[in-house]
Image (cartoon, grey):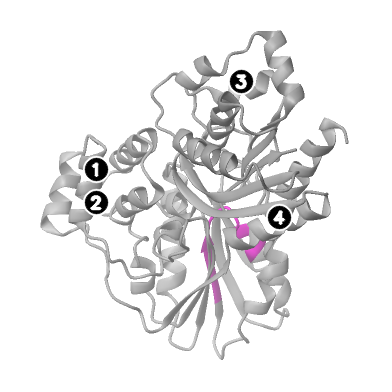
Amino acid sequence: MSADYWLQLLRRSFDAAVSSANPAIIIPSHLPPPPTGKLIIVGAGKAAAGMAQAVEAHYSPSVSLSGAIIIPHGTPAPQFARIDILRGAHPLPDNASAQSTQRLIHEITQASADDFVLALVSGGGSSLLGAPLDGLSLKDSRHVIYQLLQAGADVRDINIVRRHLSVALGGRLAAMCRAPILALIISDVVGDAPADIASGPFSGDISTCADALAVLSAHNVDCPPTLVTMFADGTAETPTGHFIYVENRIIAGAEQALAAGAETLRRGGVQTVINWGEHAGDAHELAMTHKQKLLAVQSEPHPIALISGGEATVNVIGGGRGGRNTEFALSLWRENVATHVLSCDTDGIDGQQTAAGAMFGPQEQRRAVEMKLLAEGYLADNNSGDFFARLDTLINTGPTGVNVNDYRVCLLI
């Protein structure tokens, strides 16, 4: 088989992983019967448009259905007859995020006990619902989150802080509502905890202001004095406990994406596929753990693929834009332990890059030698995306409308 075949197979497995979380397929079986009152749709996230499209298509025009969802700027969206499309920024909230959040709050607070709120939640919702608490400026909120992102903070830590900055997160949307709520959630975090996905707008929060301060301290974040005061006096505290009128239901996540990718690899002739589950942490460190796993399975029948999901992080200290998936791929490139590698974000956007990630095989490695491209310098500058761009091996999908986190394949042939 040609080298191109194996890269094409890896790409097909990624496409299968993304398709496994297609809202049009997974949403309908979870939809409730129409309520006696109004069916109010609210939502936020990178998959919200597809989720809302499936919802509107499911219910007949005779059903009293209305509402609004927030999606990132630039994300393609279908035409809706009964649901409004709002916009916001990601990964840092902007004025549009704040205004859109207020619209969702209006929808929720107008719901009566006879109505039913159907919430559509997916990754990216934290920023889209990032309207700051009263007394906290959007500028200060953005400043804090930006520092955490640049420091390579774990998504759970970032979301602990986000929950304490926004008027909508950490269960605050649920606390505002008098109607029963079903939150359908597409998970983009390891462990699938509703409080961590989009920072849990409909889930009671067990973290505290003290926890948020500890995160900021651990990452040496310059915290605005106003926020320090709000943490100290409890103004920023989130609702705790369980909302008895709310169900948070996970309907898709990394597990089924990895299963779909694995099946594609098997059908393509990979004799052994090892699903290594979900992993979080620094992209370079994840590459080293994958290297050790690959060395440990050398005796397994070949071709052999090691697949994994989860979410890597990058501590950006150089002049590049990071990109956790390209950084992971380039770190493994340097170790020269896998013959073919693909690492992509299922939402189609790898950090601050426009690509989903990258892939490579022996041909790309030979071409890099001819072009005198050295991985070490690009890694030191957190500029892995440019390295793969020069080799024309970035994977550009555009926004996929899906978000079940990273998908990685390391192949030995």
* Label 2 crowd bin: few (<14), some (14–19), many (20+), radius 10 Å: many
Question: Which residue is at the far front?
Answer: 299
Per the image, the residue denoted by label 3 is 387
Q: Secondary structure at mark 3?
A: helix
Residue type for callout 4: Ala
x, y percentage for residue 197?
45, 59
Residue type for callout 2: Ala
Residue type for callout 1: Leu
Per the image, the residue denoted by label 1 is 216
CA–CA distance in space, label 3 to label 2: 36 Å
Which one is nearer the viewer's eye here, 289 or 68?
289
Q: Secondary structure at mark 1?
A: helix
Which one is nearer the viewer's eye here, 412 or 247?
412
Per the image, the residue denoted by label 4 is 262
Which image quarter is the C terminus in? Answer: top right
Which one is nearer the viewer's eye here, 91 or 263?
263
Query: Which circle's residue, 4 or 3, is located before the other in the chain?
Result: 4
Per the image, the residue denoted by label 2 is 212
Residue 163 badge = none
CA–CA distance in space, label 1 to label 3: 32 Å
Q: Secondary structure at mark 4?
A: helix
Query: Which circle's residue, 4 or 2, is located before the other in the chain?
Result: 2
Is 42 inside the magenta-drawn segment? yes
Q: Which residues are magenta?
A: 40-51
- Answer left or right for 155 relative to 370: left
Query: Which circle's residue, 3 or 2, is located before the other in the chain?
Result: 2
Is 192 inside the magenta-drawn segment? no
Q: Residue at x 24, y 51 (%)?
A: 212
